[in-house]
Image: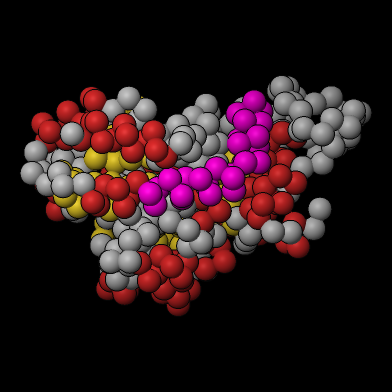
């Protein structure tokens, strides 16, 4: 289909998908095969070996490209496998400028894996993107951002960062896991590579681990596809099918995540025991203007502290919620609650974590799509 001509809600259901040529099956089959029979050596239908190509994966890759307004999609076994592939574009001596408030696993692969291969990462505040320019030198090859950030819900100006990376001929990578293409399409704003942990909103049902990259540049796609095949961190066809099924309802789910998120953010803000509430939709959010410009909604991710900032009290809240399950991850239909300092961000040293504004008592919510009245009742009894 001519993907560009349809609106997102239509693309989520139809883009890249076609009736199965062998039977007409409307839902993309799970091609559970490792290889493909050739009529003669090299005489095949574009499929040789399933690490290299799989029809279920091809459909998902095309669908992901379409919904991110990109030309090419590449799928991986996890968000971290996608991250790993992007960093493998670099060689020893190269430098990367990274937003200092980011997913703990991304920080870990950079500092504990790729730093050992001679790649240097500078973690800096990007509240004002002009800060990026000050760290660019002739070894800089890439700028890596996540927005909104996890778990502090900071917002980084994607178009502003892109203006800087274009001027210096650097690759801009944007982790769009938190926003999803429903809320934000970074390629439209000048990013070169969009990265997803499809484990989160794209999959949406907490039943699959999956990663994806989307881009417009054919040369970049070729290099990343080479890495995808050479390093082999590819997803199985069943996982691709689950993500394909998940994205068909992304718009409907995100709409409810946003509504519930807004109601809960305001509820928390009015609660006498709650300290700071971090949510992108508040007018007094430090980068609300940028959020309004680059996002189409504000999502269901909320972090908050308790007024007394007591870690024991915070942990007690986590124990008491019944609908909000205590778990890592986010973006599923069910609400989750977490404690970044001991969970997702446990791998970041305490001094650095606190310096970045992620305190001991911070609680993070991934607001699901349950009835919001029940979610509020649950928080009410847990916070007390
Ligand atoms: C979860 C997550 C990742 C890592 O993805 P996995 O699928 O868990 O490997 C990367 N970035 C962000 C923002 C995430 O939330």
Q: Position of residue 26 (x, y in %)?
A: 82, 34
According to the image, what is the colour scheme of the structure?
A: secondary structure
- When the figure is inspected, residue 286 is found, relative to residue 383, above or below; the finding is below
Looking at the image, is 43 positioned above or below residue 212?
above
Instruction: Give the overall secondary structure of the magenta segment.
Output: helix
Tell me, yes or no, whether the highlighted magenta stretch contains residue 31: no
Residue 76 shows in the view: no
Identity of the residue drawn at 28% across and 28% down: 321
User: Looking at the rendering, which quadrant does residue 121 occupy?
Assistant: bottom left
Name the spot of residue 8 as percent of width and height, x first. Answer: 66, 55
Instruction: Give the side of residue 28 with respect to residue 319, left or right.
Output: right
Instruction: Depth check: give the residue in front, 344 or 120.
Output: 344
Q: Which residues are magenta?
A: 237-263
Q: Is residue 206 left or right of residue 152?
A: right
Count of marks placed on residues: 0
Q: Nearer the viewer, residue 240 or 303?
A: 303
Residue shown at the point (69%, 59%) measured from the top left? 7
Is 164 above or below relative to 279?
below
Using residue 29 as the reference point, say whether residue 257 is left or right of it: left
Q: Is residue 245 magenta?
A: yes
Q: Residue at x 53, y 49 (%)?
A: 255
* Image spot of residue 352 (x, y percent): 16, 49
Quadrant that contains the C terminus: top left
Q: Position of residue 215 (x, y in %)?
A: 59, 57
In this rendering, does residue 37 appear at all?
Answer: yes
Q: Nearer the viewer, residue 51 or 318?
A: 318
Image quarter of residue 305: top left
Q: Residue at x 75, y 46 (%)?
A: 14
């Amino acid at each position: 289909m001519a993907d560009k001509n349809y609106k997102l809600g239509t693309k989520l259901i139809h883009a890249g998908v076609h009736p199965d040529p062998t039977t007409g099956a409307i839902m993309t089959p799970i091609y559970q095969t490792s290889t493909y029979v050739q009529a003669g050596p090299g005489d095949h239908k574009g499929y040789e070996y399933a690490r290299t190509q799989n029809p279920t994966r091809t459909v998902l890759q095309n669908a992901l490209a379409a919904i991110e307004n990109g030309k090419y999609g590449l799928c991986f076994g996890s968000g971290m496998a996608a991250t790993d592939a992007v960093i493998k574009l670099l060689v020893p001596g190269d430098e990367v400028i990274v937003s200092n408030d980011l997913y703990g696993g991304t920080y870990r692969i950079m500092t504990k894996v790729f730093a050992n291969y001679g790649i240097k990462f500078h973690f800096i505040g990007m509240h004002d993107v002009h800060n990026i320019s000050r760290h660019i030198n002739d070894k800089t090859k890439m700028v890596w951002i996540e927005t909104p950030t996890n778990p502090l819900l900071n917002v980084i100006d994607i178009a502003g960062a892109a203006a800087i990376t274009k001027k210096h001929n650097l690759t801009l990578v944007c982790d769009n896991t938190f926003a999803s293409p429903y809320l934000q399409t970074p390629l439209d704003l000048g990013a070169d590579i969009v990265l997803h942990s499809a484990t989160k909103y794209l999959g949406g049902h907490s039943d699959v681990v999956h990663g994806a990259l989307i881009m417009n540049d054919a040369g970049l796609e070729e290099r990343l596809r080479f890495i995808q095949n050479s390093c082999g961190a590819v997803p199985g066809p069943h996982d691709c099918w689950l993500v394909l099924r998940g994205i068909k309802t992304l718009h409907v789910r995100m709409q409810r995540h946003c509504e519930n998120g807004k109601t809960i953010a305001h509820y928390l803000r009015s609660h006498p025991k709650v300290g700071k509430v971090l949510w992108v939709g508040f007018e007094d959010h430090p980068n609300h203007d940028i959020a309004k410009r680059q996002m189409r909604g504000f999502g269901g991710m909320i972090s908050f502290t308790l007024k007394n900032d007591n870690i024991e009290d915070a942990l007690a809240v986590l124990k008491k919620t019944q609908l909000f399950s205590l778990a890592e991850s986010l973006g599923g239909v069910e609400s989750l609650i977490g404690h970044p300092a001991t969970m997702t961000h446990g791998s970041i040293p305490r001094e650095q974590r606190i310096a970045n504004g992620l305190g001991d008592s911070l609680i993070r919510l991934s607001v699901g799509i349950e009835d919001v009245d029940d979610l509020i009742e649950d928080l009410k009894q847990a916070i007390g």
